[in-house]
């Protein structure tokens, strides 16, 4: 559930942000966040689950 929440919250932020603040660097940062943060936190989440 925690991993799913990370994916959904990042995707919601990416798609619901106003177009007035859209810039290529912000889009790049969001795509990196979406592709790096959930897999990086996955081992931490599962180790907490196993305890």
Image: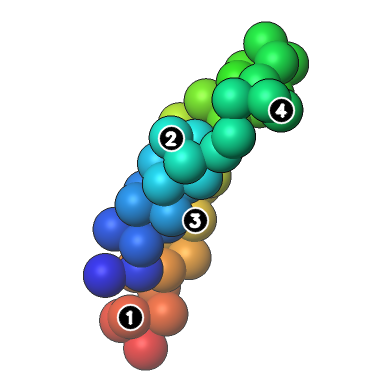
Distance between the alpha carbons at the discs numbered 2 and 4: 12 Å
Contact check, label 3 and label 1, Cβ < 8 Å: no
Contact check, label 4 and label 1, Cβ < 8 Å: no
The residue singled out by tag 1 in the image is 49
Contact check, label 3 and label 2, Cβ < 8 Å: no
SS of the residue under disc 1: helix
Distance between the alpha carbons at the discs numbered 2 and 1: 30 Å
Is tag 3's residue or tag 2's residue first in the polypeptide sequence?
A: 2
Residue 9 vertical placement versus 49 (above, below): above
> On the picture, is 27 further left or further right than 47?
right
Q: Residues within 10 Å of mark 1 (few under 14, many from 20)?
A: few
User: Residue 32, percent across and down?
Assistant: 57, 27
**Which residue is rendered at x = 70% and y = 16% of the image?**
23
The residue singled out by tag 2 in the image is 15
Residue 41 bears which disc, if any? 3
Q: Which of the 4 quarters of the picture holds residue 20?
A: top right
């Amino acid at each position: 559930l925690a991993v799913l929440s990370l994916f959904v919250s990042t995707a919601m932020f990416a798609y619901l942000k106003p177009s007035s603040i859209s810039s290529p660097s912000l889009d790049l940062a969001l795509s990196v966040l979406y592709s790096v943060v959930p897999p990086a936190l996955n081992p931490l989440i599962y180790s907490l689950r196993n305890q």
